């Protein structure tokens, strides 16, 4: 056996085990279960029977378990350490939420059960809806959207439906700040609108004069994130709302960063017509995993009639569901999602709200802002901040402190991996060159922030000393080193194929 490039015979580094692909481990004749021979039946495949092996790996049960356990140990997660991704609020998910969502009577519900048998679940949805309306100061909420991006779609569809109902077919433009989340212009375009970018001013906020100059009878509305993607509060929100409404448009707010202001600012008081709320950000429910997102949309009175179905209502026999576009729901925009929304996320979000209470939610927002400003203050002398003054929930830096060093934003991120940290959001927002966007959230203690700050200060010091090789060779301690990203993009290997037999390879 030859020595592995990692310097050990096996390729393992202590407890960091080298893990080949599951297909590379497979072998004919291995199986974790014995299956009986299937009975002989007449084929119904019309001559399309498989001629070769299906290509699945043959594995014993211990092999399969060890493989997926080892893969899980290579994942970075909020349960392993600080997750400083900006504009995504990767906060701790309290285990109380997980305990409650597994309760009998919640975990084993089926969406096709008769309404009379799921009164508790409908009450839970209604209770969560009540608190979302209370926290936002909005009169209505659509609960079914599956995540933030679909929540945006819901809101813009409601805006479009309201315009159509008034015969405003000439309103074809939606204004979007240059620092917006990429889903904002994508959503507007998907709904058939022309997107026009609004520049930022020197303070990193929407240029109010430029916005007012773009308003006109063909503007359907505006989409603004607040706090914005530069980590700053848009303090002209009320004036923006007045100007947009005076021009006959609607005001959409991207609620991805609601975590910074929940319990402190009610978007409805700012003149907002609709805003999606990422339950999996603000109210701690898990990210990712193929579908647990949840993006309820709060709506003004003007847009409430155009909310998508279903609606939970109080009926004479308890809670009921409105599922047809008739009667009071005749203007509804139909369905955006199968059934009634993401029930598992509803349970977790309500558990988070009720365990914190109004004072706890307010403190969480305050702590998130405090933590971000602590990071900003401790790093501003060694990194470069593009905008003056304090931030909200995330600290933003640019790459000016790297000028002339030969080190890039990407190099810093790779070096952070060696230090045991997931990199922050890089190169976004696009209005800041070489951006580092850091959101510590309220979940992190001063001790964990100090450790992160020490790492960033140490890396900045290495840059200053000219140790470029350290950055260009990073990461050194990961299972895989840095890719040739250009070749990976131009010539991706998308499918594993078994190696050719020795004889064939020799020929």
Image: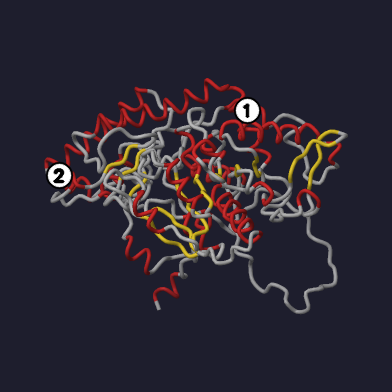
Relative to 313, is 444 above or below? above
* Location of residue 456 in the rendering, given as x and y in whole percent from the top left corner: 26, 36
Q: Report the residue at 79% width, 43% height from top.
A: 321
With respect to residue 101, does 496 lie above or below? below
Q: Residue at x 27, y 42 (%)?
A: 397
Mark 1, secondary structure of its residue? helix
Q: Is residue 97 left or right of residue 182?
A: right
Colouring used for the render: secondary structure
Q: Nearer the viewer, residue 112 or 207?
A: 207
Label 2: how many Cα within 10 Å (few below 14, some 14–19, many 20+): some
Q: Position of residue 408 (x, y in %)?
A: 23, 51
Tell me if residue 256 can be seen: yes
Residue 2 higher or lower than 82, as above or below: below
The total of numbered circles placed on residues is 2
Residue at image position (44%, 57%) is: 175
Residue 171 shown left or right of residue 119 in the figure = left
Q: Locate residue 460, reporting x and y percent.
A: 20, 39
For mark 2, what is the residue? Answer: 467
Disc number placed over residue 237 in the picture, else none: none
Q: Is residue 3 left or right of residue 223?
A: left
Within-10-Å neighbours for mark 1: few <14, some 14–19, many 20+: many
**Residue under label 1:** 351
In the image: residue 409, left or right of residue 195: left
Locate residue 42: give its quadrant.
bottom right
Nearer to us: label 2 or label 1: 1
Image quarter of the C terminus? bottom left
Q: Are marks 2 and 1 in contact (CB under 8 Å)?
A: no
Q: Using the image as rendered, state which of residue 141 and residue 219 is in the foreground.
A: 219
Q: Distance between the Cα atoms at labels 2 and 1?
A: 49 Å
The relative height of residue 343 versus residue 157 in the rendered view (above or below) is above
Residue 269 image point, x, y percent: 52, 35
């Amino acid at each position: 056996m030859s020595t592995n490039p990692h310097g050990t015979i096996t390729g393992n580094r202590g407890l960091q085990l080298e893990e080949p692909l599951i297909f590379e481990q497979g072998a004919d004749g291995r199986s974790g279960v014995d299956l009986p021979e299937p009975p002989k039946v007449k084929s119904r495949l019309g001559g399309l029977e498989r001629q070769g092996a299906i290509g699945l790996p043959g594995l014993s049960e211990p092999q399969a378990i060890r493989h997926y356990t080892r893969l899980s140990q290579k994942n970075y997660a909020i349960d392993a350490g600080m997750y400083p991704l900006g504009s995504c609020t990767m906060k701790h998910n309290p285990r109380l939420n997980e305990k409650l969502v597994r309760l009998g009577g919640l975990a084993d519900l089926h969406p096709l059960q008769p309404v009379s048998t799921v009164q508790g679940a409908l009450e839970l949805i209604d209770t969560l809806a009540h608190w979302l309306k209370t926290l936002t100061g909005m009169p209505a909420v659509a609960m079914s959207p599956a995540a933030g991006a679909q929540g945006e779609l819901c809101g813009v569809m409601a805006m479009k439906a309201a315009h159509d109902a008034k015969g405003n077919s000439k309103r074809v433009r939606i204004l979007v700040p240059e620092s917006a989340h990429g889903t904002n212009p994508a959503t507007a375009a998907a709904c058939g609108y022309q997107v026009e970018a609004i520049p930022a001013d020197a303070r990193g906020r929407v240029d109010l004069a430029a916005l007012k100059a773009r308003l006109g009878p063909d503007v359907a509305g505006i989409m603004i994130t607040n706090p914005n993607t530069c980590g700053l509060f848009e303090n002209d929100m009320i004036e923006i709302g007045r100007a947009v409404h005076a021009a006959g448009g609607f005001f959409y707010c991207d609620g991805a960063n609601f975590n910074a202001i929940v319990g402190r600012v009610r978007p409805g008081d700012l003149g907002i017509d609709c805003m999606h709320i990422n339950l999996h950000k603000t109210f701690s429910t898990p990210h990712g995993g193929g579908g647990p997102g949840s993006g309820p949309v709060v709506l003004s009175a003007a847009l409430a009639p155009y909310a998508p179905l279903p609606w939970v209502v109080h009926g004479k026999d308890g809670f009921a569901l409105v599922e047809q576009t008739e009667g009071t729901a005749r203007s509804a925009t139909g369905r955006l999602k199968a059934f009634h929304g993401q029930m598992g996320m509803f349970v977790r979000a309500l558990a988070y709200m009720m365990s914190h209470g109004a004072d706890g939610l307010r403190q969480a927002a305050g702590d998130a802002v405090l933590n971000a400003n602590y990071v900003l203050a401790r790093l501003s002398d060694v990194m470069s901040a593009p905008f003056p003054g304090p931030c909200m929930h995330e600290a933003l830096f640019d790459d000016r402190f790297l000028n002339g060093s030969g080190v890039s934003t990407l190099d810093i991120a790779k070096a952070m991996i060696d230090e045991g940290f997931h990199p922050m959001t890089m190169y976004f927002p696009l209005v800041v060159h070489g951006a580092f966007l850091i959101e510590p959230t309220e979940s992190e203690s001063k001790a964990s922030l100090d450790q992160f700050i020490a790492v960033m200060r140490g890396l900045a010091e290495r840059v200053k000393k000219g140790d470029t090789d350290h950055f260009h060779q990073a990461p050194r301690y990961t299972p895989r080193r840095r890719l040739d990203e250009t070749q990976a993009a131009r010539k991706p290997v998308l499918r594993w194929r078994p190696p050719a037999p020795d004889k064939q390879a020799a020929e």
